[in-house]
Image (cartoon, rainbow, N blue to C red):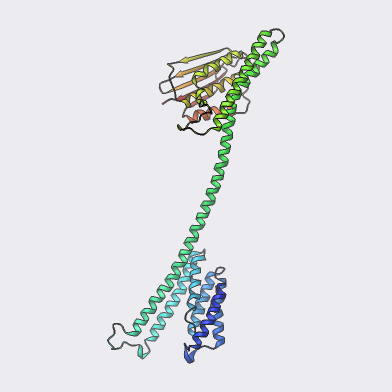
Amino acid sequence: MLAIVLGSGLAITTTLYGSAGTYGDDQAAWWVSALIVVANAAPIAFRRRWPMSVAVVSALAFAATQVLHVPEVFLVNFTLFIPLYTVGAWCSDRVRAEVVRWVVIGGMFAWLFLAIAFGWAVPNALPNDDGGLIPPYIALSLLNIVINVIYFGAAWYAGNRAWASAVAKHQLDERTAELAAERERNAAQAVTIERVRIARELHDVVAHHVSLMGVQAGAARRVVDRDPEQATASLGVVEESARTAVEELRRMLGTLRSDHDDDGQRGDEHGDGPSTEGLGRIGELADSARTAGHPTEYVVVGDARDVPPTVSAVAYRIVQEAVTNVLKHAGPSARADVRVRYLDDGVEVEVTDDGHGERPPRTTAGSGLGHVGMRERVGAVGGRIEIGPRARGGYLVRAWLPTT
């Protein structure tokens, strides 16, 4: 479209300049003018596909317009400016783009200087004595030089600016795409993390009570015929554990649904989130292990004191998971030891068992969420944890949690 518009304009202006007698008797024939019009306009249609070739062809057509005295001195300037601009704006090979533009511009200035030099051979171009500040021919030569500097400088600058703007837009689009992809990855990661967190919470809340219920239900089944009272007591423990599990699930789901409160901590719908499950309830975990038939000792070392709610909740969850593992893996009659130590710079919880039961040696087969959850919780508060078998038999879970 641009080539057609320029071609039509060149045909009109060439006809008008010809009718005005721009070159007088030296004017080119009409068919020469027609060919030059096509030579100037047609390359514009291919300027983005072959920008450097079009720039060279347009420069030659521009020169032919002047040499052959084709009566056009206006729009032909645009047919050279646009290809020079296109080289700067569209060529990805920046070195070749620089070379081609320098060659074209250098050739044009060489032609200009030759024309000025030959002009000095004309007698009336010599300096006169009419008292003017600058002789007419010198003034005209300087004016032509300034006009060409501005013309070619504008083409060069506009092309480079267009290229820089296109590169900046491309980089911005790439960064936008990268940010969008990063947001999608972060969203997917957040969903995965939330799923893992919910799975960990469910494991912590349910595993202990379900394990206790299973142990007591099995005990009730074995003694229901010969010791109904013991079977009734075991079923009572199952009932109590079921109530406790349901209550803790309700509290946990309320916590997961709630938003952060003003202190940046989560609380359930009644305001008593996980922070209430703290060090003060660890004795209940020891009692549940005794009820399940495991002789369990509970010892508190040091003077009890208030600790941050987060640390208290982490300590409770670690002991809960460790006691659950004793019920599940240590054997039906294994002994357990639960200790809480209040240290100067932290609190330490420890759960051990002797691993001696009526069943085969303990197995650690499971989902793996228990150990992972304990390590994640301890890491979240900047503590340390030790998990593994003891040299003299049994298993050890010991965690140190900072309180300062």
Name above or below for residue 375 compared with residue 94.
above
Residue 113 locus on image (x, y percent):
40, 80
Image quadrant where one finds the N terminus: bottom right
Rendered-image quadrant of the C terminus: top left
Report if residue 15 is visible in the image.
Answer: yes
Q: Position of residue 169 (x, y in %)?
A: 50, 58
Front in this rendered view, residue 1 or 59? 1
Q: Is residue 119 left or right of residue 290?
A: left
At horizontal 48% and vertical 58% (from top left) the residue drawn is: 168
* Image height of 64 relative to 182, above or below: below
Residue 331 in view of the camera: no
Which residue is at the far right?
A: 225
Q: Which residue lies at the image location 52% right of the left edge and 19% below the top edge? A: 281
Residue 337, image x, y percentages: 53, 15
Tell whether 302 sits left or right of 320.
Answer: left
Image label count: 0
Which quadrant would residue 232 be assigned to in this image? top right
Residue 95 vertical placement versus 191 (above, below): below
The residue sitting at 45% across, 15% down in the picture is 301
